[in-house]
Amino acid sequence: MANKILVTGANGQLGNEIRAIAKSSADSYIFTDIAEDAETRYLDITDLDAVRKVVKENSVNIIINCAAYTNVDMAEVEDREKAESINATAPANLAKAIKEVGGLLVHISTDYVFGGEGDRPYTEEQQTAPTSVYGRTKLAGEEAIIATNCRYIIIRTAWLYSEFGKNFCKTMINLTSTKPQIKVVDDQIGTPTYALDLAKAIEAVVAKYDGSQSGIYHYSNEGICSWYEFAKAIAELYGTTECDIQPCTSAEFPSVVKRPAYSVLNKGKIKATFGVDVPCWRDSLVRCIQNIKKQ
């Protein structure tokens, strides 16, 4: 039987990738965000009654929550309440609404729930220690979902990029195309994640979920690099190698947020449980840049 899937945050990077793969799916999708268009319905997920209404009226049995407040600097200084509302209150609302119909919530979380002080890939069982408002509100969202005792899959990811919206990959393409020289930090280590790969992983999880695998999972692409190495790869693949990309330290870009120095995620659990394919970040970057060039 086909699923009725509600996707929140549908206008973001991941939401757009899910929209693309939904076109060839047997399931039925409802795409929502705070901005309406021909394909997207308005839904305020901080309003529990509004969420319940959409779920019940459309016989939704799966919610994929791609919505998040992700401006980590603004969350730290001005938008703490907004970050709390979207990253913690809203996931609780989605969990409550889906529990009432016995459905599944797939929620996207972040590497920022960890302190970033390690040197080995983080497993799902490791102690969380967020160092920012963004990280703390995302962790609060995870905890709120678990507390409802609904059926849930929480997927932590990191360094998300795509051909949609604003992201590091598109920023680097713009900067290396227009600047003779740029500096990029080389003391923050992680793994870039192509949003299309994450969307396909979510599709696989939904297809294989049988009610017994609720829990927290990690997904990013395979491999490890610094932001500097990522930027160099982007310029090489896009063809903007005339720009001189220089490595620098995080101290050269002062911020109100303490960003994780190490945010590599261990993907063993999601691969073992759902048989999810995890491509290398370099291979995925090739595919993404090909899609950007097609645009």
Image: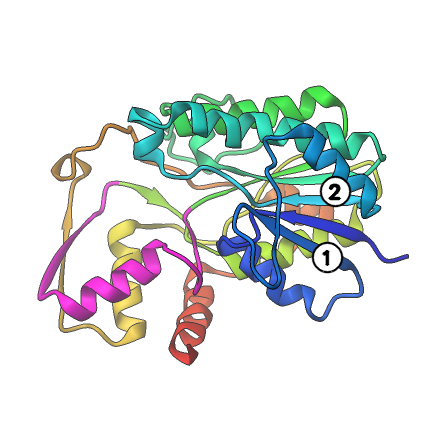
First of labels 1, 2 by sequence position: 1
Give the residue drawn at x 71%, y 30%: 49
Instruction: Tell me which amino acid carries mark 2.
Output: Val
Q: Give the answer, above or below, for where 110 lies relative to 126.
A: below
Q: Residue 3: image x %, image y %? A: 82, 53
Q: Nearer the viewer, residue 244 or 83?
A: 83
Q: Which mark is residue 29?
A: 1
Q: Magenta span covers which residues?
A: 159-187
* Residue 277 shows in the view: no
Which residue of the protein is positioned furthest toward the left in this rendering?
180
Tags 1 and 2 touching, CB below 8 Å: no
How would you rate the neighbour count of disc 1 (Cα within 10 Å): few for under 14, some for 14-19, many for 20 or more? some
Q: Nearer the viewer, residue 81 or 225?
A: 81
Give the residue drawn at x 45%, y 74%: 291
From the image, which quarter does the N terminus lie in?
bottom right
* Residue 134 shows in the view: yes
Mark-to-mark CA distance, 1 and 2: 12 Å
Q: Which mark is residue 54?
A: 2
From the image, which quarter does the C terminus lie in?
bottom left
Q: Is residue 290 left or right of residue 255?
A: right
* SS at mark 2 in the image: helix
Q: Quadrant of residue 197?
A: bottom right
